[in-house]
Amino acid sequence: GENVEQHPSTLSVQEGDSAVIKCTYSDSASNYFPWYKQELGKGPQLIIDIRSNVGEKKDQRIAVTLNKTAKHFSLHITETQPEDSAVYFCAASPPSLGGKLIFGQGTELSVKP
Amino acid sequence: NAGVTQTPKFRVLKTGQSMTLLCAQDMNHEYMYWYRQDPGMGLRLIHYSVGEGTTAKGEVPDGYNVSRLKKQNFLLGLESAAPSQTSVYFCASRHTGDLYNEQFFGPGTRLTVL
């Protein structure tokens, strides 16, 4: 089955710097790759996603890139702000009834003022 | 809309006790999921449902049972709780089809098994 590896597990940046989180997946048939942000004491919330027929997607300060050949996708956050501090999860969705997601282990991002 | 709600928010059980976690959604979603979240392991799928009356196993189903008697509710049961089931449990739901893939998560239930 699908396996998703996420790195780094913790990331500390200064306010205004960029942050990059990387994920690899094992099932070449996976076709949907979302990123979720989880603030302390809350459930995860979708921040951006990408489908397998697209190489890059941007939404203001966040962007996601996908390399299908390498089975690798990344989250890029530019001009980081203290409110970006949270745990970020990547996920991959292998083809299946039910839209199952296989999550990475999570990255705790800390943005220091 | 309340979105996805979970009951209870916190619970402490003794080994061998049973309990049921309730998930409710008011978005008319067909698909519903139960995950557990443990430090360093991300979110792991326990069971899921693709519609009223259906359930299926996820990555870590052992020790749990589920039921989806009504479309808006998804129940997670622990028949005989074990310390290894100490975790934070999240429920999620989403629409069917490929146009709307977002899973909406509830606020979680923190369960401790002593």
Image (spheres, rainbow, N blue to C red):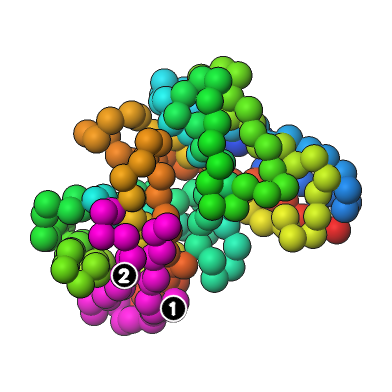
Question: Can the viewer see residue A78 in this picture?
Answer: no
Q: Quadrant of the C terminus of chain B?
A: bottom right
Residues drawn in magenta? A1-30
Question: Can the viewer see residue A69 in this picture?
Answer: yes
* Amino acid type of the residue tagged 1 in the rendering: Thr
Residue A54 highlighted magenta (yes or no): no
In terms of image quadrants, where is residue A24? Answer: bottom left
The reply to whether callout 2 and callout 1 are in contact (CB within 8 Å) is no
Left or right for B70, reference A66:
right
In terms of image quadrants, where is residue A104? Answer: bottom left
Please name the residue shown 26% across and 75% down the image. A20
Q: How far from the left and from the top, in percent, is residue A84?
A: 34, 65
Instruction: Using the image as rendered, state which of residue A31 and residue A21 is in the foreground.
Output: A31
Instruction: Using the image as rendered, state which of residue A89 and residue B34 is in the foreground.
Output: B34
Residue A28 highlighted magenta (yes or no): yes
Q: What is the number of the mark on residue A48?
A: none
Left or right for A29, reference B31:
left
* Amino acid type of the residue tagged 2 in the rendering: Thr
Please name the residue shown 35% across and 61% down the image. A90
Please name the residue shown 24% across and 51% down the image. A31
Same chain? Circles 2 and 1: yes
Instruction: Using the image as rendered, state which of residue A106 and residue B46 is in the foreground.
Output: B46
Q: How far from the left and from the top, in percent, is residue A64?
A: 20, 62
Query: Alpha-carbon distance for marks 2 and 1?
Result: 17 Å
| Dot 2 alpha-carbon crowd within 10 angstroms: few under 14, some 14 to 19, many 20 or more | many
Left or right for B67, reference B50:
right
Mark nearer the N terminus (2 vs 1): 1
| Chain containing mark 1 | A
Location of mark 1 (residue)? A10
Please name the residue shown 50% across and 32% down the image. B49
Q: How far from the left and from the top, in percent, is residue A67?
A: 16, 67
Q: What is the number of the mark on residue A24?
A: 2
